[in-house]
Amino acid sequence: MRLLIMGPPGAGKGTQAKGIAARYGIPAISTGDIFRTNVKNETPLGLKVKEIMNSGGYVGDDITNGLVRNRLAEEDAAQGFLLDGYPRTLAQVEALDGMLEELGVTLDAVVSLTADTDEVVARLLKRAEIEGRADDNEETIRTRLRVYDEETAPLLATYAQRGLLVEVDGLGEIDEVGQRIAAALDAVRA
């Protein structure tokens, strides 16, 4: 399976991505995790990314596209993958289309997790407390949600037009949401 998982920050993408990846035996590729690793290790990329993330913005297409291109070229992604956090812009959709064409593959589905804004803010504030994430304060969270609505949500229409969009309610217990996703993907594969 070659999949994308999309949804607003805090909708549970990272949590659900792990389960989807395990179910299909594919790597879950999170651009956010790649960025946070670089920030933690204080790489030159990490220092740039830290400044962007702390302001609530998104890392630019040039940096992100390069990271994704390199990751999709790795051996473990040859039989499938799940991208989490990418693409976020129409330009990234076009870049991903080009990468997939170069690899001679297509996407199977785009899972979109839906979630109430206030519930998402509460989830992210709780996560910030537990994990000590400096990039998750209420103002930054609301900025990220606004940026998502403005820049990323329109991508869902693009994938819907292509017949790839699978919408799943992201609220509820982790296992319950996972079962909804599995049922939706099983229907796609049928």
Image: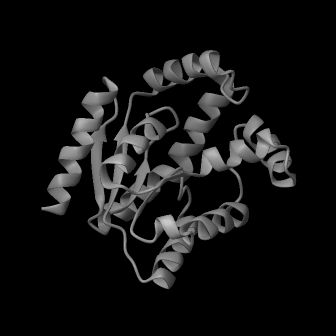
Q: Relative to residue 54, is residue 24 depicted above or below?
A: below
Q: Quadrant of residue 156?
A: bottom left
| Residue at image point 53% right, 59% down | 87
Q: Relative to residue 168, is residue 187 depicted above or below?
A: below
Colouring of the image: one colour
| Residue at image point 52% right, 70% down | 75
Q: Is residue 49 left or right of residue 187?
A: right
Q: Is residue 6 left or right of residue 85?
A: left
| Residue at image point 31% right, 69% down | 162
In front: 32, or 22? Answer: 22
Q: Quadrant of residue 146?
A: top right
In front: 23, or 181? Answer: 23
Tell me if residue 55 can be seen: no
Q: Position of residue 133 (x, y in %)?
A: 68, 26
Tell me if residue 48 can be seen: yes
Q: In the rendered image, which quarter contains the C terminus? A: bottom left
| Residue at image point 30% right, 63% down | 164
Q: Position of residue 38 (x, y in %)?
A: 76, 47
